[in-house]
Image (cartoon, rainbow, N blue to C red):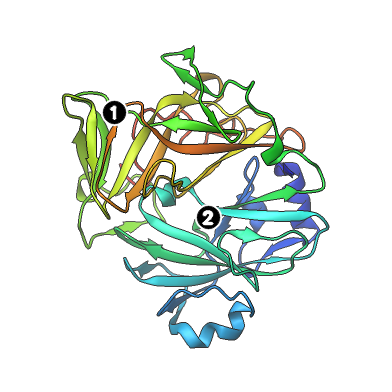
Amino acid sequence: MKSLVDKELKRLLADGVISHISDSVDLSEYVQPASIDLPVGDVIYHVKKKYLPFDALLREVLDDVLIEEYDASESMTLYKNQTYLIPCLRIQWQEWFSYRVSPKSSIGRIDVLVRSVFDQTGLYDTVFVDASGELWLEVTPKSFNISVMRGVALSQIMCFDEGQQSGDMLDISWLQLLSLGGHDTQQQWYDNKILIDVWIATWQLVWYKALATDAVIDLTQHSVCRSDHFFVPVYAQDDASLMLEKDRFYILATKHDIRIPVAYAAELIPSSHLVGELRVHYAGFFDPWFGGEMWATGVLEVRAHEDIIVHDGQPLCLMSLYENTQLPSVAYGDAWNHYNMQRGPKLAKYFG
């Protein structure tokens, strides 16, 4: 399979293959080089439990889990450890097309678990080939309360043409994706996925740990929140190691700089038994030309499920690469994307 780029995604929107459930949202304003951002629409539902309707339409079972319905035309607070459902997309049948969904980077960096639920699927973040139905976002803030309203993008969707064979079967071992100190570095591969190492430099700021707080992060504004109200900086010990505490959230950085070739898109695998019982990424998509000419550090959003010590250069996640159907009209970074030249463990754009 191959991933579609902006020109093709706009055509899908124009043809009504993909449309927002809310008439108040113009999805053409949310198209990225190889994905479409998914904003909040007109309504948000507070629900009492999570539910994957593998044999039903989500609208048909909503009353069984509903606590309260909210109007999203004005700013509202989503509380940590509570779950909310947001109706988002209508997807019409298109031969050989499938979809994957992942939170936006800014959302992953504030420990908000955003997963998509598609009618009659039974799996998160997946729309099978040749499917039709509604796609909803299931939102659970983990560390912080957040404020959202209509138009705030929480997630993003990638579209794949499975009639064009490539994707997971693509031989990418010859591509140079990682750099260290401005020089190409040896890359490790597992099952045609590249291993990504964590960076922990002795006595330097190497990550941030989420604080326990009831303060609210306003997702409708940029650069207004004080980072020290939500995160504490953490420094490595003499042996360039750090302890990840069970059920705590961290922002880390990759040891190597990353550059995604403009003819490809990439996805980080959120968790793998190969690296331990932890989730290493919420927002897994990398658009074509992430890093660009200058390369960029990758940021990891980590929640451990057990206490674990990690060391500098230790493999912590895996990355898959997908060939695009064509080159995007605007590559990542050319549109002044917020994280394109990031260095080290960079916090979300909401912090000043």
Instruction: Kindly indicate the quadrant of the structure image that contains residue 46.
Output: bottom left
The reply, left or right, for residue 60 in relation to residue 345 is right
Q: Is residue 8 left or right of residue 180?
A: right
Residue 197 to residue 293: above or below:
below
Give the quarter of the image for residue 250: top left
Residue placed farthest to the left in the image?
238
Whole-number angstrom distance, CA of label 2 to CA of label 1? 29 Å
The quadrant of the rendering that contains the C terminus is top left
User: Could you say whether the residue bearing mark 2 is in a helix, strand or loop?
Assistant: strand
- Front residue of this view, candidates 184 and 230: 184
Whether residue 266 can be seen here: yes
Who is closer to the viewer here, 284 or 215?
284
Q: Position of residue 52 (x, y in %)?
A: 54, 73
Q: Which mark is residue 125?
A: none
Residue drawn at x 79%, y 41% as measured from the top left:
165
- Choose between 125 and 155: the one closer to the eye: 125
Rendered residue at 55%/67% (across/down): 41
Q: Look at the image and tell me whether residue 338 can be seen.
A: no
Q: Is residue 185 or residue 217 the one in the foreground?
A: 185
> What residue is pinned by disc 2?
155
Rendered location of residue 275, percent (x, y): 40, 41
Q: Tell me the amino acid under the disc marked 1.
A: Ile
Could you say where residue 343 lies in the image, as x and y percent from the top left? 38, 27
- What residue type is disc 2 on? Ser
Residue holding disc 1: 200
Q: Quadrant of the rendered structure where residue 54 is?
A: bottom right
Location of the N terminus (image quadrant): top right
Left or right of 222: which side holds 225? left
Give the crowd class for mark 2: few <14, some 14-19, many >=20 residues within 10 Å.
many
Residue pictured at 58% horizontal, 64% vertical: 123
The answer to whether 137 is drawn above or below residue 269 in the figure is below
